[in-house]
Amino acid sequence: MKKRLALVEIFHHREPRLLISGQTISGFGDGVANVALTLLVLDTTHQSVSKLSLFAAARMIPMVAFLLIGGAVVDRFSRRLLLLLSDLSRAVLTGAVVVLIVTGTLHYVELLIFAFLFGAFDALFMPAITALTPEIVPEDLLGAMNAVRPLSNSFVGNMLGPAAGGLLAAWSTSFALGVDGATFVASAFFLLLMRPSPAPPRTAGSSMLDEIRTGLRYVRRTTWIWTTLAAVSLPNALVFLPMSVLLPYYLLHDLHTSKEIVGYLFATFGLAGTLGAIFAGSMKTPRRRIRVMWTIWSIGSLSALIMGVATHSWEVFLVPVISAPTMYIGNVIWESMLQSEVPRELLGRVSSVDWFVSLGFSPVGLVAAGFLSGRYGVQDYFVVTSLVCFVPGLFIIASKKVNEIDRPRASVDRQPRSEAERQPDEA
């Protein structure tokens, strides 16, 4: 019964409540901006799928490039202050784009610069929020916290936000992006309300390069981490991230739907992700975490096969209905594993390596997705890549060495019960 109430219990703690509140508001703005920026780039480039993919890659490249540095910074300074810096900086960047739109001076080049700078602050934000979580959340509620954050982001940021974003962007792109900028300011306000968090302990005299190497060595000698990161980089680069570019393009270019339908597509990702996060927050942590996680992720990757036969918008919408909840459920298992198995003083660096490797091929994947889908079609692209990406997950599910981390947990299932345990309960 206690497990079912974990999603509610997390809100009884002040610091998690403030963090979730700020991130929920910011997530709404992100949802609005995701639709607004997608439509803005397509309008600016005359419906060029390759340039839309390049825009998405321009945000990914600095994020990947600076992640290891960001992880080292996160393990040196207050994680709360770094989140505050990231939010305020992205608010300023978004405001600058709004000014360029209003003054009629925005071009594709400025959008690429914006994406690059935005991605650099993403590289600081992602390891910081992962490392801050176990500082403010009791260990028995880590699973709930790792579910409630994506739950709020899914419901507000990926469902309500995109639905509103499609309507707002159809009316005024500058206003839609202005809403996003304001939500970053609101998130920063909630971070200011939180109690100051101290800088994590570290070895005196160690350089940032030495600390980065320490994080890399830990990941390299931990089999279940590096194999998962290497394997997940492929579906991230070729299937999951290209969905946000190629599905809207397919709806607009091939099926000739309206801009509002694109907003509803993003909202479907949010609704399905919300349901997945609710399930993840209330489910019991599986004993065989690696195998369960990869089975779920593999189902999500194979959902792209639907695009091979999709000729109506409702069939396209089936892809997020399956892929979004599977991504969220698998991610909750993964983040909880990192936060419970990795030493706290290394968590920022290990988290940065996590993001660095798992997203490392994504910029190339996004550019390749734009080129290949433009040449061979969106449908053929997803059929081939989803089948290719299924292979590494199958290897990890079958590997005894990778699953060794869960052997003590799984062996509990095979232990014989005591005589007392075998006796039926008396009425």
Image (cartoon, grey):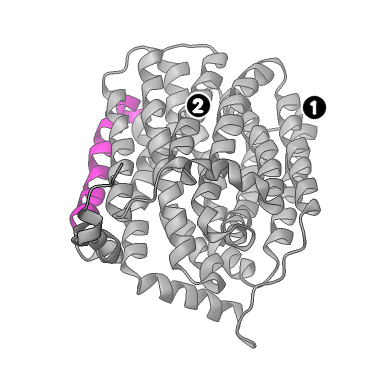
Alpha carbon distance from label 2 to label 1: 32 Å
Q: Label 2 is placed on what type of residue?
A: Leu
Give the SS element for disc 2. Answer: helix
> Closer to the camera, 196 or 298?
196
Q: Is residue 265 left or right of residue 70?
A: left
Residue 393 is a magenta residue: yes
Q: Could you say where residue 417 lies in the image, as x and y percent from the top left?
A: 21, 59
Label 1 crowding class (10 Å Cα cut-off): few <14, some 14-19, many 20+? few
Which residue is found at the position 80% from the left and 27% from the top? 102
Which mark is on residue 102?
Answer: 1
Q: Quadrant of residue 325?
A: top left
**Highlighted magenta segment, given as a residue range:** 374-398
State the residue position of label 2.
271
Q: Quadrant of residue 11?
A: top right
Q: Could you say where residue 145 lies in the image, as x and y percent from the top left?
A: 55, 49
Q: Quadrant of the C terminus?
A: top left
Q: Is residue 388 left or right of residue 74?
A: left
Residue 280 is a magenta residue: no
Label 2 crowding class (10 Å Cα cut-off): few <14, some 14-19, many 20+? many
